[in-house]
Image: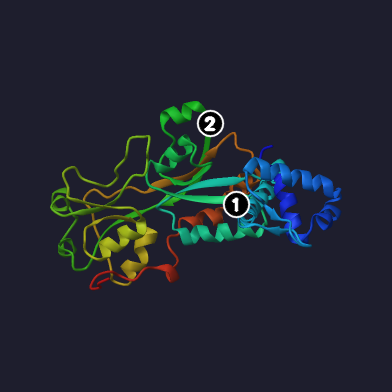
Amino acid sequence: MNLSLEALQIVDMIARRGSFAAAAAELGKVPSALSYTVRRLEEDLDVLVFDRRGNRARLTEAGRELLDQGRLLLRAADELACRVREVASGWEVELRIAVDAVISFDRLRAMIDDFHRLGSPTRLRIGHEVLEGCWDALLDGRAELALGTMHDAPSDVSASGQFTHRPLGELRFVFCVAPHHPLAASVGPLTREARLAHRAVALADTARNRPARTLGLLGGQDLLTVATMEQKVAAQIAGLGCGYLPEPFARPHLAAGRLVALEMEDPRPPEALRYAWRSAARGKALGWWLSRLEVARVRKMLIAGPAEANLAPPLAGRLA
C-alpha cells in the first residue's frame, strides 16, 4: 500500500474525532474499514501511528509527524484541484509579464491593483528586463506579455509569426549630469570627445539568449553598469557618471536642481515603445491586460515615469 491521500484523510479524521468509531461515522464508513487502512499504513511505514490504549485513539510521536506533514499534502491537493477547475474556466494559472526598466513599477501597480480586484485566480509574475530582455523573455517562454520593448521584433521573431506587438507610446531621452559633475560647466553642445573623457552610467541588458544591445554609449568610455533605472538615476544624481535618462524619470530631478540637462551635438532620438505578447495565448488574464492596454490613457500612464511620492531622495552628500 502506498501512502495515499485517503489514508492521510482517515488519520486526520481519527485524530480530530478521537476514535475510530467517531471518525467512521463522520466519513460514512464502518470502523473496521478505517482500522484496516491504518493497520496497512502502519505496516508499510513500520511505525505505530496511533496508541490504541485507553478510550481515545492518540497519535504517537511518529503519527503526529505524519499528520503534520500529511495535512500540508492534503491542503496542497485541495489547492491543486481548485487550480485545475479554475484553468478549465479559462483563467491561466499564472501570467508572466516582462516589464522594461523604462516603465516605473508604481505606474504598473495601479493596473495590478485593478486586476486583483477582479478576484481572478491567475497569479501574476512580474519580471524586470532591459533592452533585449523583453523579447528574450518572450522567446524563452519566461513571459507571455512584454511591456516597453524599444524596437520591433528581431527578424527571426517576426518571421515566426508567434508574437504580436502594438505601440505603447513615444519616449524622449535627455542627457543629464549632477550640478557638481565636471560636464555641468560645459558651454555649447556637448561633443562626443568631451563625453568620452567621463564615466557613463548604463543599464545592463538582461537578455540571456540573444546578443546584448547598448544604446547611447561610446566605445572605449569608462562605464558604471547598474541593474535598474532607479539605480541609474541615483548614480547620476550622486555624480558617479553621466548618461541619457528617460525624460519622465529625469523631469522632477531637473526641476529640483538635482540634475542638469545638457545640449548634445548628436542628441538621442525618441524611442517608440511597444507592448508584445504571444499570439497563440487566449487566457482571460492576458485578455484583460490587452484590453486595458488598448486605452490611450492607460498607455500614457505607464510611460509617465515615477510618481512624485515615490521619488528616491538624492544620494549626494549622504552615507549609508
Task: Assess disc 1: are there few (<14), some (14-19) or many (≥20) residues with their C-alpha within 10 Å of its C-alpha.
Answer: some
Using the image, tell me which numbered label, if any, was put on residue 231. none
Provide residue 222's location: percent of width, then percent of height.
Answer: 17, 50
Provide residue 284's location: percent of width, then percent of height.
Answer: 66, 45
Provide residue 65's location: percent of width, then percent of height.
Answer: 60, 55
The answer to whether 309 appears left or right of 188 in the picture is right
For residue 184, which quarter of the picture? bottom left
Q: Nearer the viewer, residue 264 or 24?
A: 24
Q: Nearer the viewer, residue 232 or 165?
A: 232
The amino acid type, in three-letter code, at marker 2 is Gln
Provide residue 148's location: percent of width, then percent of height.
Answer: 45, 48
The amino acid type, in three-letter code, at marker 1 is Arg
The answer to whether 255 appears left or right of 52 in the picture is left
Residue at point 59% right, 51% down? 123
Using the image, tell me which numbered label, if any, was put on residue 292. 1
Q: Which of the image's four quarters has the C terminus?
A: bottom left
Compared to 29, does 111 lie above or below? below
The span from disc 2 to disc 1 (Cα, nearest Å) is 22 Å
How many numbered dots are placed on residues in this image? 2
* Residue at numbered disc 2: 162
Residue at point 58% right, 46% down? 94
For residue 118, which quarter of the picture? bottom right
Q: SS of the residue at dot 1?
A: helix
Q: Nearer the viewer, residue 151 or 209?
A: 209
Lower sequence index among marks 2 and 1: 2
Mark 2 vs mark 1: in front: 2
Residue at point 66% right, 38% down? 2
Q: SS of the residue at dot 2?
A: loop
